[in-house]
Image: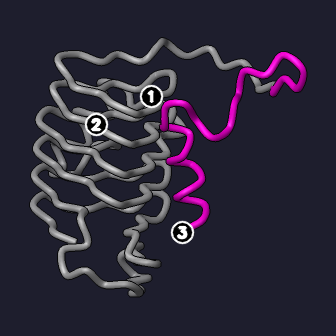
């Protein structure tokens, strides 16, 4: 986990240790038909923000923000990998989730994430702190989909973190 985390965050450095734009050895990828990232009233430094991501009034530093990520207002994302989502939730799906008291895919407003890997389709409520508050090196909370490896908090794919949770 640590080497995966470290190597991905190295891509955020300027200059990056690894060069994606080498005309002698090009890297090819599948084209996606996604809208460009929307970043509004935010501070972003040393970060990669992928297609379809929406960031609003937040601070992001030394982070990879994946496809279709949704980051609510007043969030702080630092030293983190946010894998994104496999799909966008429609307005109708969002209304339905919220009407049932659920958490939409993405990161809820007022949340802080530091030193973490957030897998795809994770639902993080409002005002959460994913920061390894107790400084734990290793822990497993398999039923909740939460792991800590080498001090890095890992949230498993499709897990839901309720409003106000502190990890």
Q: Indicate the quadrant where residue 68 lies.
A: top left
**Structural crowding at the residue carrying mark 3, measured as other residues with C-alpha within 10 Å and reported as few (<14), some (14–19) or many (≥20):** few
Tell me if mark 2 has few (under 14), some (14-19) or many (20+) residues whose alpha carbon lies within 10 angstroms of its own. Answer: many
Marks 2 and 1, how far apart in space? Answer: 10 Å
Secondary structure type for disc 2: strand
Mark sitting earlier along the chain (2/3):
3
Residue placed at 81% from the left, 27% from the top? 27
- Mark 2–mark 3 CB contact (< 8 Å): no
Which quarter of the rendering shows the C terminus?
bottom left
Q: State if disc 1 and disc 2 touch (CB < 8 Å).
A: yes
Give the left or right position of residue 51, taking residue 162 as reference. Answer: right
| Label at residue 2 | 3
Q: x, y (%) of residue 70?
A: 33, 33
Q: Is residue 48 magenta?
A: no
Q: Which residue is mark 2?
A: 60
Residue 20: quarter of image: top right
Residue picked out by circle 1: 49
Looking at the picture, how far across and down is residue 134, in whole percent? 19, 81
The residue mark sitting in front, 3 or 1, is 3
Q: Quadrant of residue 142?
A: bottom left
Q: Report helix, strand or loop for mark 1.
A: strand
Q: CA distance from mark 2 to mark 3?
A: 20 Å
- Marks 3/1: CA distance? 21 Å
In depth, the one of 153 and 165 nearer the eye is 153
Q: Point out the image quarter for the N terminus.
A: bottom right
Residue at 37%, 69% (x, y): give it. Answer: 153
Residue 14 vs residue 42, the one in the foreground = 14
Provide the secondary structure element on which disc 3 rests.
Answer: helix
Residue at 39% of width from left, 53% of height from top?
A: 122
> In the rendered structure, which segment of residues is drawn in magenta?
2-27
Q: Residue at x 40, y 69 (%)?
A: 152
């Amino acid at each position: 986990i640590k080497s995966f985390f470290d190597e991905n965050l190295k891509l955020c450095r300027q200059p990056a240790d690894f060069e994606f734009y080498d005309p002698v050895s090009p890297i090819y990828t599948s084209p996606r038909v996604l809208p460009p990232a929307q970043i509004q009233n935010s501070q972003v430094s040393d970060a990669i923000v992928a297609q379809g991501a929406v960031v609003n009034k937040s601070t992001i530093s030394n982070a990879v923000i994946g496809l279709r990520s949704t980051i609510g207002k007043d969030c702080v994302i630092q030293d983190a990998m946010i894998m994104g989502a496999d799909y966008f939730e429609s307005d109708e799906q969002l209304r339905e989730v919220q009407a049932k008291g659920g958490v939409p895919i993405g990161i809820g407003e007022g949340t802080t994430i530091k030193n973490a890997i957030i897998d795809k389709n994770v639902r993080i409520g409002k005002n959460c702190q994913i920061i390894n508050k107790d400084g734990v090196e290793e822990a497993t909370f398999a039923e909740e989909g939460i792991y800590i490896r080498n001090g890095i908090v890992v949230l498993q794919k499709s897990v839901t973190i309720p409003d106000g949770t502190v990890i």
